Amino acid sequence: MGALLGVLVSGAWAAYSGSGADFRFAILGDRTGEPVPGVWDEIWRETDADHPDFIVTVGDTIQGMQDATMDAQWQAITRMLKPYRKYQIFFTPGNHDVWSDGSAREYEKYTKHPLHYSFDHEQAHFTILDNSRSDLMPSAELAFLREDLQKHASQPLKFVFSHRPSWILPVVLSDSHFELNEIAKQYGVRYVIAGHIHQMLRFELDGITYLSMASSGGHLRDGKEYQRGWFFEHTLVTVRGANVEFAIKEAAQPFGESRITTPGDWGAAGLAHAAGH
């Protein structure tokens, strides 16, 4: 796979690799809060074994929340990620990463990304939004999203990432009249993806797939039941032309059983179909 090249232009990342329209990227869930020792390291080993073209996180990379320790925590992450810097990593800011103006500056310093940005890879466009400090999607982020999608309207595939699933309540209620959904529908966004709650869930609304990604290290809740979406994983996404295939890969033992599912196996309350292997 060709190496990904990126350049920051007017707040947006323009990124392309090689020729041809087939590529693969990985999605990593939350590392924190309350990280389970050893899980994130295992998830990175398994992700590396898949050899994706690049990696997108859904946020919460450090435990954070204290200005006095954030620099040391980011330095520890930098050391941990050193073997994987052959991959371009597109970070999403989570509430454990950004909680103050100072933490926002540290996040930008260590991730080498602004709080919101976008990038192209082949025929796909990716928008990263910042709702790290609000359960609702801030109006400024929605304005950025609209402007960004207008500029990249010709891209056939569009993905939108944020940390918090600010969309989850109206989507659960099948209420399509909220601004994020209206923007996504207008510009043909296929997938809206978030983390934060550490639970694997899927919703469909107006032709858009909304995904809540399971954890990549942050603690599991609610009885830790796989069938309800509580497990450790990374996701490998394969893009072939206009076709997108997700392989949601549960961690291997001792952190999981290496089960593999697709978004279609999941629903609004957890597992809807039998898991594959």
Image (cartoon, grey):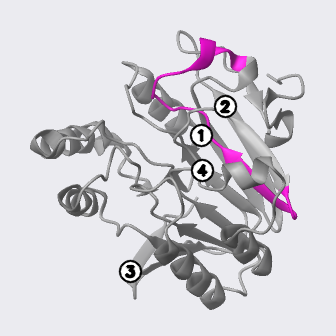
For label 3, the residue is: 8
- Whether the residues at callouts 3 and 4 have beta carbons within 8 Å, the answer is no
Of tags 3 and 1, the one toward the viewer is 3
Label 3 to label 4, Cα distance in Å? 26 Å
Q: Judge whether 127 appears above or below 7 on screen.
A: above
Q: Looking at this view, is 125 or 32 the one in front?
A: 32
Is 210 in the magenta? yes
User: Residue at left 43%, top 53%?
Assistant: 87
Amino acid residing under circle 4: Pro
| Mark earlier in primary sequence (1, 2) | 1
Q: Tell me the number on the disc at residue 249.
A: 2
User: Residue at left 54%, top 14%?
Assistant: 255
Q: Secondary structure at mark 2?
A: strand
For label 1, the residue is: 50
Q: Judge whether 173 appears above or below 139 on screen.
A: above
Mark 1 closeness class: few <14, some 14–19, many ≥20 residues within 10 Å: some
Mark 2 closeness class: few <14, some 14–19, many ≥20 residues within 10 Å: many
For label 4, the residue is: 165
User: Residue at left 57%, top 25%?
Assistant: 232
| Mark earlier in primary sequence (4, 1) | 1
Dividing the picture into quadrants, the one containing residue 125 is bottom right
- Which image quarter is the C terminus in? top right
Of tags 2 and 4, the one toward the viewer is 4
**Which stretch is magenta?**
205-226
